[in-house]
Image (tube, rainbow, N blue to C red):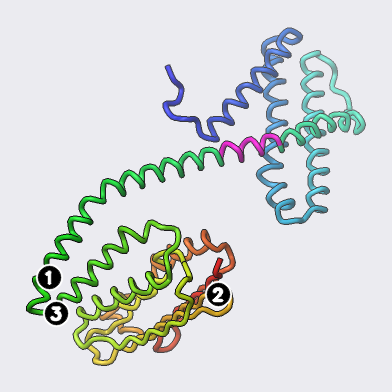
Amino acid sequence: MKIWRQAPNIVQLQLLIWTAVLLLMFFSQLPMNGLLKTVIYTVVNATSDAIIIYGNILFLYPVFYQKRRFVWYGISVALFLILTGMLRGYTNIILYQFFQFIKTSPVHLPTLLAYVPEGILTYVLSFVFRIAIAYFTLKRQTEEILLQKSQAELNLLKSQVQPHFLFNALNSIYYRVYKVDPPSAGLIERLADIMRYFVDESPKDKVPVSTEVAFIENYIALERIRILHGASVNFEKAYNPDLRIPPMLLMTFVENIFKHGIDKSLKQNQVTISLVQQNDHLFFTTRNRKADPEFGDEPGGFGIINLTKRLRMLYGDKFQLTIDDGGELFTAFLKIPLL
């Protein structure tokens, strides 16, 4: 019978390790002590080791060493090992006197300090323990990423049939509509381009910036037909045509404009969009008049939150994202490095 049907996670692996440690301690002391004494000594010593190991890898190391507070880390480790060693020694001495029916006598400081070197060895082993945890965590994450990638590739293959069928159908509709209504046929063509972008371009790591801009312009053209009086969109573009950026990186701002920043009752909806390359950075700015609450919800929301998470994954802390909704205008600004 299998204990776990799937590969054990990091918690289960730690339980296995500590089970092995407890058994080793128990059977190594059992010939010299009785069952009860062996169990108590095993629990005390294993607890002391666990306090040192997890105290270092979960508190001292991340709080001091990883924040480059090396002096404080050294002082904290020394005090921590002295304290845990003395507590361990005191506990063992009291237990020994109890089991040997020896009258309790004062415990001297040198006697307690003699237990500290044993904790130093456990402290060194805590780094091995930490490396093992990091390795299995990384291995597990790698396996999950590979599994997700395989599943995504399978889903993509399964989804290839329907989009291409729709492309062919839209082409047929386009040629029929073009004969009687060329403007409507143009909108159908833009819709087909948007769908083709989702299927062919969005799964890629990077796409030409011109492809991203074309996708945005197609989206704007389709959104305009839903607005009673239309919208005046000024799109400034100045960039290297060979520039490549991650797909769907700019779309969130444009989508927010038409979801939250358009008042369909107004005859003047002014929208300004700017995409400019300067040196080693790309600057993207959108500016629109804020709609009344009855016509639009608060801009941003989960779209901006998810975009921020994605930007952190792509650029770390090397990007700049600011939102200014003071006054009558809503302004979004994004600055990303050109890697």
**How far across and how far down the image is residue 274, in percent?**
43, 82
For disc 3, the marked residue is 182
Q: Which of the two discs, 1 and 3, labels the residue nearer the N terminus?
A: 1
Nearer mark to the viewer, of 2 and 3: 3
Find residue 175 and name its label: 1
Q: Which residues are magenta?
A: 128-137
**How far across and how far down the image is residue 194, in percent?**
28, 67
Q: Which of the two discs, 1 and 2, labels the residue nearer the N terminus?
A: 1
Q: State which quarter of the image contains the N terminus.
A: top left
Spot the residue most to the top: 31
Q: Secondary structure at mark 3?
A: helix
- Is the magenta region chiefly helix, strand or loop? helix
The local crowd at label 1, few if under 14, some if 14 to 19, many if 20 or more residues have their Cα within 10 Å, is some
The amino acid type of the residue labelled 2 equals: His
Q: Is residue 122 magenta?
A: no
**How far across and how far down the image is residue 152, in percent?**
36, 47
Q: Secondary structure at mark 1?
A: helix
Q: Secondary structure at mark 2?
A: strand
Name above or below for residue 110 compared with residue 313: above
Give the residue displayed 51% in from the left and 42% down from the top. Answer: 142
Q: Nearer the viewer, residue 292 or 338?
A: 338
For disc 2, the marked residue is 281
**How far across and how far down the image is residue 55, in percent?**
70, 41
The amino acid type of the residue labelled 1 equals: Tyr
Quadrant of res 180: bottom left
Between the C-alphas of marks 1 and 3, the distance is: 9 Å
